[in-house]
Amino acid sequence: MTQPLALIVYERLLPGSQLVNRLQDLNYRVQVVAKPEQLVEVAQNAKPLVVLADLEPARQQAFSALTKLRQNAATKHLPVIAFGADEGDQLKAQAEAAGVTLLVSHTAVLNYLPQLLDQALQLD
């Protein structure tokens, strides 16, 4: 059986590399998207099961890429787990507008990754 593919967009080395390792421990193949603006193209070609996106430090670029992902017919179905600093209602509103499936803190994404993946991948 083929391992599911997770795309991850991050710029900060420490949380990003930790998340890659955690995903691999959960038997996911992982492909890192170096620049948020490449997300849609990579997602169309790679056909991942889930997308994870670090919202720091380039929050606006990340939200722009996630919005384009949702607007693209070939990628709009993909669940997106976004993580960043907990900044309250403004961040939640931006994430909702961009079509984020789950918004969590950096700590939560590492500590609760299996549960977050299960929740994001649930079919309606």
Image (cartoon, grey):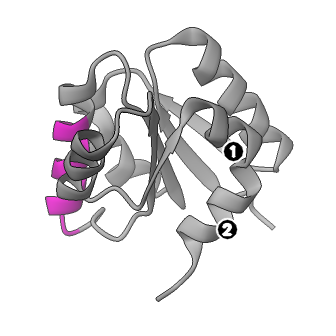
Q: Is residue 8 left or right of residue 88?
A: right
Q: Which residues are magenta?
A: 63-73
> Mark 1 is on which residue type?
Arg
Residue under the point 75% across and 40% down: 111
Residue under the point 58% across and 22% down: 16
Q: Position of residue 98 (x, y in %)?
A: 21, 52
| Residue 59, disc | none
The quadrant of the rendering that contains the N terminus is bottom right
- So how many labels did they put on this image? 2
Q: Is residue 41 left or right of residue 67?
A: right
Gap between marks 1 and 2, in whole Å? 16 Å
| Crowd rating for badge 2 (residues with CA inside 10 Å; few <14, some 14–19, many 20+) | few
Q: Position of residue 119 (x, y in %)?
A: 60, 69
Nearer-the-camera pick, 79 or 103: 103
Decide whether residue 72 is among the magenta residues.
yes
Q: Disc 2 designates what residue?
A: 118
| Crowd rating for badge 1 (residues with CA inside 10 Å; few <14, some 14–19, many 20+) | some
Residue that extends furthest to the top in the rendered view of this protein: 13
Badge 1 or badge 2: first in the primary sequence? 1
Q: Main secondary structure of the magenta part?
A: helix
Residue under the point 68% across and 31% down: 20
| Quadrant in which residue 96 is drawn | bottom left
Which callout, 1 or 2, points to the residue nearer the camera?
Answer: 2
Residue that extends furthest to the right in the rendered view of this protein: 25
Q: Disc 1 designates what residue?
A: 29
Q: Position of residue 124 (x, y in %)?
A: 46, 89
Circle 1 — which element? Answer: strand
Q: Is 124 drawn above or below residue 116 in the view shown?
A: below
Q: Are marks 1 and 2 in contact (CB under 8 Å)?
A: no
Nearer-the-camera pick, 19 or 7: 19
> Mark 2 is on which residue type?
Asp
Decide whether residue 119 is among the magenta residues.
no
